[in-house]
Amino acid sequence: MIKPPARKAPPRKTAKGAKYELCLYVAGNTAKSSAALANLKRIAADHLAGEYSIKVIDLLKNPALARGDQILAIPTLVRRLPSPIRKIIGDLSDTERVLVGLDVKPHA
Amino acid sequence: MTVQTNKRPVPKNRRLPGIRKAPSGIAGLDEITGGGLPSGRPTLICGGPGCGKTMLAMEFLVRGATEFDEPGVFMSFEETAEDLEQNVVSMGFDLKALQRRKKIVVDEVRVVRSEIHETGEYDLEGLFIRLGHAIDSIGAKRVVLDTLEALFGGFSNAAVLRAELRRLFDWLKQKNVTAIITGERGEGQLTRQGLEEYVSDCVILLDHRVANQLTIRRLRIVKYRGTVHGTDEYPFLIGQKGISVLPITSLGLTHRAPTSVISSGIAALDPALGGGLYESSTVLVSGTAGTGKSTFAGHLTAATCERGEKALYVGLEQSPDEFLRNMKGIGMPLRRYVSEGLLKFHALRPSAHGLELHLTTIHQHVEEFKPHLVVIDAITSFFGMGLSAEINSMLVRLIDFLKSRGVTLYMASLSENAASAERGGANISSIVDTWIQLRNVETNGARVRTLSVVKSRGMAHSNLTHQFAITGKGVALQNAPSQQPS
């Protein structure tokens, strides 16, 4: 029943065997989505030291993909790797919480 | 003086645009809602855990897809698709096949708080897109969200959730889908999260409670904007063919009329009836105390079980053991049919329950046991429990129900005295098919038992009053004709 989402969009930034495989779900080009993407790029560049890949999935274009990763809230950032899967919802404006969510930093 | 009237002609066939309704296909529910749920609008179904919300919602969807050509989406926030599929098998629904045929989509939404971190602003656009995609993929006309309140456990920002819920209900209306939203019963309000605030068109409350060790489910329409609806609490059952809400008056007068004739169990009586009794007909046997009503029931029961068919004996006056002993005493050993599983008893004092509960339990027994014959000994025991209008309507519903299932019904009716005997009891004599009147006539220092066939629909029956005796081998008819009853 649950189909893995097709991987179409090329990663924005790739390192070989990226340690952090990140996927950002958005719905069209809204202010929240743009903010989330900008925040994500900044946080990744600052804290993940090139060991990451970012893929953006626009659910307006691929509505079927919402099911696979159990997406309800927009924007949602899914950390596919390393496992287990983690989800961070919102515009990612709180860098500390994002880092905790991604398990880059231990819980405060 | 003439009154000035409005000269504008009123078109005759113009019907006021009332609320369009989506038939639920659930037995009885469409009766009390006057045709179904409001079409293109959301309906809230609320109740405590295990009261049947999911089942009702699922049946609405399945009936829509199979009977009304309205495909549906079931968005489950609580149960997995596998669990749902298994749970509805008991009602005879094959969800897997319906999904393959693109009649139903089951979308399982998992909301796990521990997996989710929140940082900054968000909305639930993903839910809208998901639901919209599911609706569009099969052209769904019906949607079930079961239960939306799980969202409150998944997201911490209640303000966002409430705004999004309001948007969701507006969006569902725009999509013109008939939706059922289920909600858990809350303290002091209908649902825990106050969903009733958002759904203003139709609210149905389900409830189940235990009375005298028997669980009874009830349904009440709290609100149905713009329509006339039943306001009582109606008992309902979840059976093998889905949910049935009593009154099941929806059966109406459409039952088939079998032409096969069965014996009354007394060979000598059959000719007087014009050959016997029609299968799945309703037989009323009335008489004062001690005229032999139960004995006639015993004969019919014995004949039914002898054919290998099942009989349900609803005893309101004597215990099963007493009945078995008494029948054995007059040459009818019925006990072996009990051990063979052909004869089942449902005995209780009429005062033990309310009328609706009696009706419900008889329904339940019929659904489970699937008898060919139901004996109620005696229906007059119900009187004094309520207004006679209520009892009549209950008996009419029972007769309708049994006829629709092809079950023969035998009702004994106790007459207070000879004068009331002619009325037969319960004013239901007009709807029974066969009516046999038993009498005890005192003549020349002896009581003489007589019977007369007052009516036997569709049968050339005897006009005579027959004498009979109750012997060690049951009823023995003496075909000596006596005078016609005046």
Image (cartoon, rainbow, N blue to C red):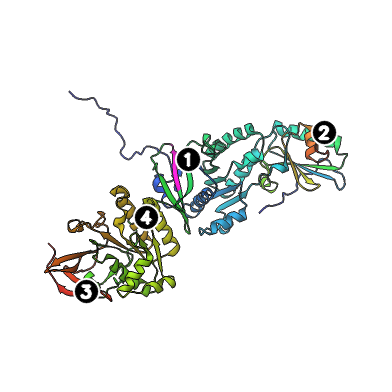
Q: Position of residue A2 (x, y in %)?
A: 68, 52
Which sits earlier in the primary sequence, circle 3 or circle 4? 4
Q: Which mark is residue B477?
A: 3
Q: Residue at x 22, y 25 (%)?
A: B3
Q: Position of residue B222 (x, y in %)?
A: 45, 39
Q: Which residue is mark 4?
A: B251
* Residue B347 is a magenta residue: no
Disc 4 with disc 1 on a shared chain:
yes
> Which of pointers 4 and 1 indicates the residue nearer the eye?
1
**Residue B350 appears anywhere in the view:** yes
Chain identity of mark 2? A
Look at discs 2 and 1 and give the one toward the viewer. 1
Nearest to the observer: residue B31 or residue B232: B232
Q: Check the picture and name the quadrant holding the N terminus of chain B.
A: top left
Query: Which residue matches tag 2?
Result: A42
Compared to residue B90, the image places residue A99 above or below, namely: above
The span shown in magenta is B218-225
Asked whether disc 2 touches disc 4, contact meaning CB atoms under 8 Å apart, the reply is no
